Amino acid sequence: MTHTERSIRIGDKEMKFSIGHYAKQAHGAVMISFGDSKILCTVCASKEPRPGIDFLPLTCDYIEKTFAAGKIPGGFYKREGRPRDHETLFSRIIDRSIRPLFAETWRNDTQVIATVLSYDPDHPTDVCSLIGASMALSISNIPFGGPIAAVRVGRFNGEFVLNPSSEVRAQSDLDLFVACSETAIVMVEGGGDEVPENVVIDALLYAHQSCQPLIQLQKELQASIGQPKRPVAAVSIDPETEKRITELATPLLKEAVVVRDKAARYEAIDQAKHKVLEQFKHEAGEAAYLTREKDAKAVFSDLKWLIVRKMIVETQKRIDGRGPTDIRPISCEVGILARVHGSAMFQRGETQGIVTATLGTSQDEQKMDTLEGFSFKRFLLHYNFPPYSVGETKPLRSPGRREVGHGALAERAVERLIPSQEVFPYTIRIVSEITESNGSSSMASVCGATLSMMDAGVPLKAMAAGIAMGLIEQDGKIAVLSDILGDEDHLGDMDFKVCGTEKGVTAVQMDIKLAGVSRQTLEQALEQARAGRIHILNEMKKTIQAPRGEISRWALRITKIKIKTERIKDIIGPGGKVIKDLVAKTGVAIEVGDDGTISLASSNSEMVEKAIKMIKDITREPEIGKIYLGNVRKITEFGAFVEVFPGTDGLVHISDLSDKRVNRVEDIVREGDEVLVKVTNIDRMGKIRLSRKEAIGQKVSD
């Protein structure tokens, strides 16, 4: 392929593309330059389809090389290893954006790899990676229904910002990643700071408009240097088989798909399928059936979804009998686990999650090693989806991409509602264990996270809830569905998850299979989601209306005190000797900040008070004129050295020991004696002059 270079301005930034110069043996490759960021995007597909499968074997990987930011990987093994969570999340975003655009019958192993080779924090690499994946697919011989493009939209000071820098993004009250085709929005991922629904819609349409120059550039490149696309096997169903299976299955499926209980419904559908196939086999004969079995099963599967889709748009009744806007029954419980700091059970229909909140100190923060450098994360939300939740048996493995993705969505939904560290100095870990699942388990995690934190006494800024919306467009009719079931997710044309508070949106995730969705439909979906969210929040408030007044007795109490920065060394001591001694004597976890803030964490308030007293004793400074009860540490011919508090002593001259003449110091005091002394002078060197004579008859100063 001839080396081709193109460039285009996106907002106020230029993006450059180099094709035919790098990775020339890949089936499609493009190097994207965006500022100082460089991303190599490649695509390859196997020569032959994978036999015996009924799905698209697509793999998408977004990889950040540490050398891209001039760094060497941390740890003992000095090379990149397991993908970090944000790499996994963006690999999913690429997959979700492009997967619906492949032909239904494409069964060749297909791999997309986006590798970050140079990293510039002011020019996002995630946006470039999706654009590069689409461009590489478009110019390759792999059949692909693109092109698509992507932008990130922030809102800063009320204005939309296209592909904001990391600094502007951190200050934005809206952060959306949007992938678009020429006619539609195909994928959305992002969040906001309780942003109104109309602002979200404006941002989506702004993103779609901004993507169009990138899409047109890809179409031009595809026309000028693109390779001819490989043929795709056509869907060929025997007409007689299709007709007869439809006749046999339609009445049975119409009864089976409206069974409300998930397990019973699946059983009814399986029985209907078995009955239909047995009847068809009897009519066709053994030999003929073997040649038509695959077609018969495919027709039955397609018919099942078609019947449900038509039923919903024509009757406005859903599988479980609900109307389009109805929410499944909700039940909530809090404080269900005695020793856990905060716990909740959230159930909506046949989806249930047990969600816990654990409070820790700053030592429990997660250290994040990214291309931008090291940072610390004090709010964590982990989502687990065990196989028993759907009545299956599978090996238990480490969290997969789906679990990482669902956890990140739920985390984003509540993260902006967490109080600042100054207000609530705890690290918070939420764990959502999905114990039953029939759709919207990630949204159950949002609700459960809110409830568990309120049970733990976390002073949230507001309560958050989540709802999954669906869309079905069939025969020119549209139905927007609230709180979708798992089956409605699979058969629908849109999966739109919306999380937020009573005030506005905190997180959104959307995948669309349609060629286009109007603003009117988006407005209807978001308004329906808002109404559903308010309903869910009201149900949650029936269980708990406000965070508990105090944290669990099993959680560490964190108390903060402040000392002068120049006294930090006194608390630490040589080699950490002093602070280790404090911890050993009290059992309190002690952390000393650079600004002199000392955090003490323990579930034993008496030990905290003891530690505070010890710290105050170490860092106390004497004041001239104050009376102290000191301990005689050393006797000399000219006086006695008295320790007024740990680590601080002064000299009582022999002339200041008594109001009478003193011949020998030992006549008045001995080592180990406790004596009242008054501070009479502190010189420029910090040396303290004490007087016992002036303290006689006095009381210790407050």
Image: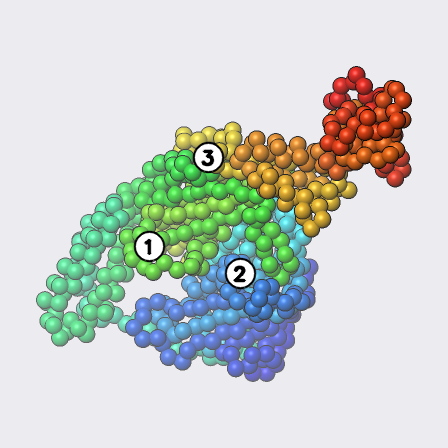
In percent of width and height, residue 384 lies at 41, 52
Residue that appears at 73% across and 31% down: 672
Residue type, label 3: Asp
- Left or right relative to 98: residue 122: right
Of mark 2 and mark 3, the one earlier in the sequence is 2
- The amino acid type, in three-letter code, at marker 2 is Arg
| Precedes in sequence: disc 3 or disc 1 | 1
Relative vertical location of residue 42 with respect to residue 427 in this rendering, above or below: below
Q: Secondary structure at mark 3?
A: helix
Measuring from the top left, give residue 494's x and y in whole percent. 41, 53
The residue under label 3 is 455
Quick one: 411 or 634, which is closer to the camera? 634
For the residues labelled 3 and 1, the Cα–Cα distance comes to 28 Å
| Number of numbered discs | 3
Q: Which residue is mark 2?
A: 84
Check contact, mark 3 vs mark 1: CB within 8 A. no
Secondary structure beneath label 1: helix
Q: Which element carries disc 2, helix, strand or loop?
A: loop
| Relative depth, front residue between 678 and 612 | 678
Residue type, numbered disc 1: Pro
Q: Is residue 42 visible?
A: yes
> Where does the N terminus fall, quadrant-wise?
bottom right
**Residue 604 or residue 151, whichever sits in front:** 604
Count neighbours of disc 3 (C-alpha within 10 A) and say few if under 14, some if 14 to 19, many if 20 or more: many
Identified at 47% across, 58% down, the residue is: 186
| Residue indicated by mark 1 | 387
Marks 1/2: CA–CA distance = 24 Å
